[in-house]
Amino acid sequence: MLSTMQDVPLTVTRILTHGMTIHGKSQVTTWTGEPEPHRRSFAEIGRRATQLANALRDELGVDGDQRVATLMWNNAEHVEAYLAIPSMGAVLHTLNLRLPAEQLVWIVGHADDKVVLVNGSLLPLLVPLLPHLPSIEHVVVSGPGDRSALAGIAPRVHEYEELLAGRPTTYDWPELDERRAAAMCYTSGTTGDPKGVVYSHRSIYLHSMQVNMSESMGLTDKDTTLVVVPQFHVNAWGLPHSTFMTGVNMLMPDRFLQPAPLADMIEQEKPTHAAAVPTIWQGLLAEVTAKPRDLTSMARVTIGGAACPPSLMEAYDKLGVRLCHAWGMTETSPLGTMANPPAGLTDEEEWPYRITQGRFPAGVEARLVGPGGEHLPWDGESAGELEVRGPWIAGAYYGGAGGEDLRPEDKFSEDGWLKTGDVGVISDDGFLTLTDRAKDVIKSGGEWISSVELENAIMAHPDVAEAAVVAVPDEKWGERPLATVVLKEGATADHAALRTFLAQSIAKWQLPERWTVIEAVPKTSVGKFDKKVIRKQYANGELDVTQL
Ligand code: ADP
């Protein structure tokens, strides 16, 4: 029999109306580079989001599930767009401003975006693309930035503040099916065309609840979170929506993402939490080592998107800041795991749990699949590809207007699970340790070598700033590791010394023979190591490699 419960849809509209009333006094603070940042209450954000929805419908003619793109930093106006666009039934499409121009053009065309909201400071990026973006009918500009380049362009141009001024602060929000599209985000397309992940109202609602649980970020209205992870990258890990559920204050860095302003805003605004990828925390560490700042308000930090070296965690422990490791993907909304250790352990006993990628929440089912398609046990030793399923995990990619959804075989199993492309082990109590991406693992003489384990071990050397390890072809073994190392300023360690240091923690047969010192590890648009580029440099003979 069916239940007797009400079947109320889980929607972003509900997150908006709840946050702006029950948590109306909570604030979004946006850094401006001036001594006093810009502050706006949730009540005001909610009213302005409502005005934005009215303007998009009445003035710009946005209708049905049309796509409204954003090309924006993290700021109050971007939060307004996050709430308004899905609530009116349209689809929010966040554009990654670090993607190459031709990918942005492809993505806007594929999503068939009708409107783009853009920060004035990003007009130099957008305007040259506009002749190649025929679907865009309206450009809405907010915040500081020179507008002169907009003269004579084809789409209609609107000033965000003028568009909102005087609009009604009520809206007859539609009753939406919770399974409808609310937002979309394209993966960075490191191989092939970018792939569009379309989030539903229901997936965003459930994901937001999980973010708010104490086994995940566990923030309340007493907290302020510094949202460094961009709103154009996997919904800023869900924070703009999850915070509106529980009244968590947000501190938004806008375009001030360099280590120095980040350190300043932490010291001045005293956030209690922050979220960002490891590259940001590496940069901030160097900054506060050179010029000390008080970071201790920020007791907890969520770090993910790429493996967090244990040495980085230790360095922040000493500063009174606890990094909590998380794993996720664009396809997983992104929260997949978080490394909060089980209860009742001493600091020492917690450590082995903290350096894993973390534990799966109830909403994420996981399994490990071996090379022959067999399911592997959770014994902390059997390594396989991670597959996941759950209510906030993608089951397909967007096929474009009128096209069918795409379910490529290398991304989805026959029974509908997402193949993550990540390789690792799971302990019997459900903690995931990733050893590699399937395409980065080093297959040496029939055995797998983890590039991540080697990188972490090299980065633990005091002379090393960063290290990336990639597989390179080897006549005898098939593949062997190549270690590329960035030394700290003034450091002198040579390859032989690094190899000897590594031998203390790594099995002899896994030790790299090939070493090279480079100036910086190449990074992707979201700040991850770009191993594809290193492999290419090696293949082209562009690296000065020492063989030991
Ligand atoms: P892209 O594939 O374009 O980088 P995502 O940002 O969705 O897009 O990246 C997801 C991938 O990032 C994961 O599949 C995984 O390889 C990596 N990743 C994310 N979090 C972690 C983590 N905590 N440790 C190691 N790798 C991670």
Image (tube, rainbow, N blue to C red):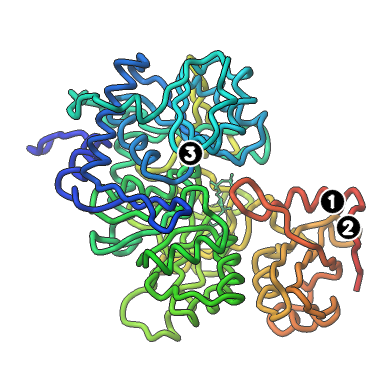
Mark 3, mark 2: which one is toward the viewer? 3
User: Distance of mark 1 from mark 3, alpha carbons?
Assistant: 40 Å
Relative depth, front residue between 371 and 216: 216
- Seen in the picture, residue 204 relative to 103 is either above or below; the reply is below
Decide if residue 366 is in sight here.
no
Q: Position of residue 435 (x, y in %)?
A: 61, 63
User: Distance of mark 1 from mark 2, alpha carbons?
Assistant: 6 Å
Q: Which mark is residue 537?
A: 1
Which residue, given by chain and number where applicable, does mark 3 sit on?
144
For label 1, the SS is: helix
> Is tag 1's residue or tag 2's residue first in the polypeptide sequence?
1
For label 3, the SS is: loop
At horizontal 74% and vertical 48% (from top left) the residue drawn is: 532
CB at mark 1 closer than 8 A to ligand 1? no
Please state which amino acid type lies under the numbered disc 1: Gln
Do the numbered discs 1 and 2 sit on residues whose CB atoms are within 8 Å?
A: yes
Please state which amino acid type lies under the numbered disc 3: Pro
> Going by the image, does 5 lie left or right of 513?
left
Q: Position of residue 217 (x, y in %)?
A: 35, 61
